Amino acid sequence: MRLIEDIQLSYGVEVEDFFKGKKKCYRLKQVVGTEPILQFSQNELTTLQMCMSFTEHLLGDELFTEATEALEKNQLLLTGKQR
């Protein structure tokens, strides 16, 4: 129980417990309806897109496609607000 409390206090998350048969299990409580926390600001995303364009010929088709898709996913999550 101390470890669960440490996790809750250190990371600011809520841990819920439940029984699966005779075993007691724990999981992070899922919060529905909240906006995702983005790892990139608009400026960071723009810089990464510029770097990707400069290195397109070095990455090859497969890696370039993966990088493009990852950046597009993050770009879709951006609201109009910058950090």
Image: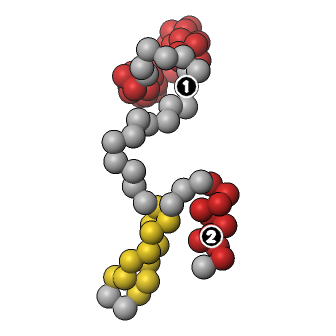
Q: Mark 1 = which residue?
A: 40
> Going from the N terminus, do you reach mark 1 or mark 2 first?
2
Report the residue that reaches farthest toward the bottom.
22
Q: Label 1 to label 2, Cα distance in Å?
A: 30 Å
Three-letter amino acid code at the position of disc 1: Phe
Q: Secondary structure at mark 1?
A: loop
Q: Is residue 56 left or right of residue 9?
A: left
Q: Is residue 38 left or right of residue 83?
A: left
Q: Is residue 11 left or right of residue 35?
A: right
Three-letter amino acid code at the position of disc 2: Glu
Which percent across, then down, holds residue 48? 56, 17
Q: Quadrant of residue 3?
A: bottom right
1 vs 2, front mark: 2
Seen at 42% across and 20% down, the residue is 79
Seen at 54% across and 16% down, the residue is 82
Which image quarter holds the C terminus?
A: top right
Q: Does residue 14 show up? A: yes
Q: Secondary structure at mark 2?
A: helix
Q: In this orientation, which residue lies closer to the viewer: 56 or 28?
A: 28
Q: Mark 2 = which residue?
A: 5
Seen at 32% across and 88% down, the residue is 21
Which percent across, then down, holds residue 36? 43, 36
Q: Residues within 10 Å of mark 1 (few under 14, many from 20)?
A: some
Up/down of 69 relative to 20, above or below: above
